[in-house]
Amino acid sequence: MTLTGPFTQLLTFADLPLRGALSDDQLQVIPNAGILTEDGKIIATGNFDALREETSGKGVEVHEISGDAVCLPSFTDCHTHLLFAGSRAMDYAARNAGKTYQEIGAAGGGIKDTMAKTRAASDEELARSLNDRLNRHLRNGVTTIEVKSGYGLSVDQELRMLRIIKNVGDAHTADVVSTCLAAHVIPPEIGDERDWLQTILEGIVPVVEAEQLARRFDIFVEGGAFTAEHGRQFLEQLKSQGFGITVHGDQFTAGGSQLAIDVGALSVDHLEASGEKEIAALAQSDVIPVALPGASIGLGCAFTPARKLLDAGASLAIASDWNPGSAPMGDLLTQAAILGTFEKLTTAEVLAGLTFRAAAALGLNDRGRLSSGQKADFIAFPTADYREILYQQGQLKPHRVWNNGSPIT
């Protein structure tokens, strides 16, 4: 066993609910705290001096922390597109000059531009860039990272992307969760969405299953991508085969969130276009809404109605959407802090959205809280007051990160 501390403050999130609004008064903040871990799991949290006395003479290794440090569960980023090649700086400039996302895509930019650059990149180039992005996230306290395919958009290229994600992820310190997003947009070589969705089911899914390349599938339900009607049949087939499913929904127009509810998806991500009807329906469902503030910042559009979702009784996870087009920043904490400011979220709501609520959006209930039996993934910030973390809007970074109880920075 290992005892780590003392932390000036330790926030456990142990008793916070998965759904609904949270006040900062609900946070359990332990002063002068320690974490007792063994075999990558948390055994106990509590007063550091008391834990040291209780475990004295029992062969416990003590890792002492000097200076101010606020300890939290490490972050989960439950929605990223980290495997890509090239830049879409031209798209960004065009949007700022007045072009819409859809107009840029119709003119040859957008997702298909990244598709061409990703197809042209070597396996080594793609693996190296993915590893670099994972490393940056890890340094910033993100120890569980979802990564989507979706820029290959052919059977061979999508499988290539998924194999690279698996190979890099298996060797990386962070926990990498692979998602197949072959249903990102319709490939240029295929004119009909039904044909491509059927090709995914017949040509990609069996290989994904045989090689265990992913246990999750995603689809982009939006004009210019896929309709809810055809998406329903696709997702129902995948769910019947035991895959977890999620939906890119309500980004520009509503409809995707209702599909996610109807098929029992784990999450629906984006929701910038969700109105009162969609919010009420999500609050009555088990689907976890995922806000992607990086896309709102990158596109200059409204944020996910996070305040209304929480007040209605829904859950709320926050993810980076790190991608080369709409969300190039990739700084999860900065984006979450900005979302909190504009949507008037409490510190508890933002931090919950980055930890156990984000993990739940991936179907992971073993992390995101500092309590007995949970995965020993935690981070420390060089401050004496947890409120400084969001107050500094992403400029205060973790100075220590632990994964499975072992320090990695």
Image (spheres, grey):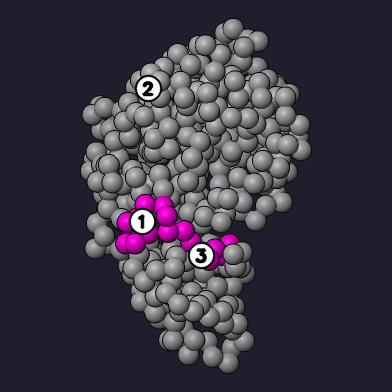
From this view, report whether residue 288 is shown above or below residue 222.
Answer: below
* Residue at 42%, 22% in the rendered image: 95
Q: Position of residue 328 (x, y in %)?
A: 50, 36
> Looking at the rendering, in which quadrant would you find the C terminus?
bottom right
Three-letter amino acid code at the position of disc 3:
His
The answer to whether 36 appears left or right of 133 in the picture is left
- Residue 396 highlighted magenta (yes or no): yes
Q: In terms of secondary structure, where does tag 3 sit? A: loop
Three-letter amino acid code at the position of disc 2: Phe
Q: What percent of the width, then of the height, locates residue 341?
A: 28, 46
Report which residue position mark 2 lands on.
Answer: 252
Magenta stretch bounds: 387-404
Query: Mark 3 — residue?
Result: 399
Left or right of residue 67: residue 84: right
**Which percent across, then down, holds residue 5?**
48, 77
Position above or below: 49 against 189: below
Q: Are marks 1 and 3 in contact (CB under 8 Å)?
A: no
> What is the CA distance from the residue labelled 2 to the residue labelled 3?
38 Å
Q: Which mark is residue 128?
A: none
Q: Disc 1 on helix, strand or loop? A: loop
Question: Which amino acid is tagged 1?
Answer: Gln
- Which residue corresponds to the image point at 33% horizontal and 43% vertical from the top-left? 339
Q: CA distance from mark 2 to mark 1?
A: 31 Å
The residue at which mark 1 appears reads as 392
Where residue 218 appears, as percent x and y from the top left, is 53, 30
Tag 2: Cα neighbours inside 10 Å, few (<14), some, or many (≥20)?
Answer: some
Is residue 87 visible to us here? yes
